[in-house]
Amino acid sequence: QVQLVESGGGSVQPGGSLRLSCAASGSKFSELSTSWFRQAPGKQRELVASVTIGGVITYAESVRGRFTISRDDAKNTVYLEMNSLKPEDTGVYYCQRAEWQPPSRTEVWGQGTQVTVSS
């Protein structure tokens, strides 16, 4: 079973930057995509950004132009560079990896990393 380990969360002031990492290990199946989700207190988990194995990238409208998702396949790691952070970016950020595990698609989640944006 693949394991995902997130790192890079923390506390920053508005306007600051953070870079999150999601390192995958132990996978025996083909990756389809890796995504970052976030969940603020009292709110539903929402998609922040996603990158497919082919390099197709999707962003939530709320982070477009401020966040950048990228991948280093040699390191089995996906990054989320977050700039111009706002208080509304606060939440627990989760990495999700979608794999093709025949005969179906399977999604695996990391444990989450806290991001707090506050003055």
Image (cartoon, rainbow, N blue to C red):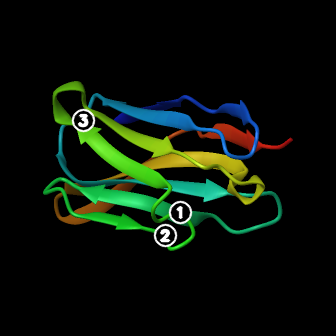
* Number of residues whose C-alpha sits closer than 10 Å to that of mark 1, classed few (under 14), some (14–19) or many (20 or more): some
The front one of 8 and 44 is: 8
Residue type at numbered disc 2:
Ala
| Residue depicted at 51% across the width and 74% down the height | 61
Query: Of discs 2 and 3, which sits in the foreground?
Result: 2
Can the viewer see residue 1 in this picture?
no
Q: Which residue was labeled with disc 1? A: 63
Look at mark 3 in the image and give the residue it sits on: 27
Residue at the spot 20% in from the left edge and 57% down from the top edge: 100
* Residue 60 circle label: 2
User: Residue 15 versus residue 1: which sits nearer the camera?
Assistant: 15
Judge whether 92 appears above or below 25 on screen: below
Q: Which residue appears farthest toward the right when viewing the image? A: 119
> In terms of depth relative to the viewer, which is nearer, 9 or 64?
64
Mark 2 to mark 3 CA distance (whole Å): 27 Å
The label nearer to you, 2 versus 1, is: 1
First in residue order: circle 3 vs circle 1: 3
Residue 83 lies, in percent from the top left, at 54, 46
Residue 12 at x, y percent in the picture = 73, 35
Tell me the SS state at disc 2.
Answer: loop
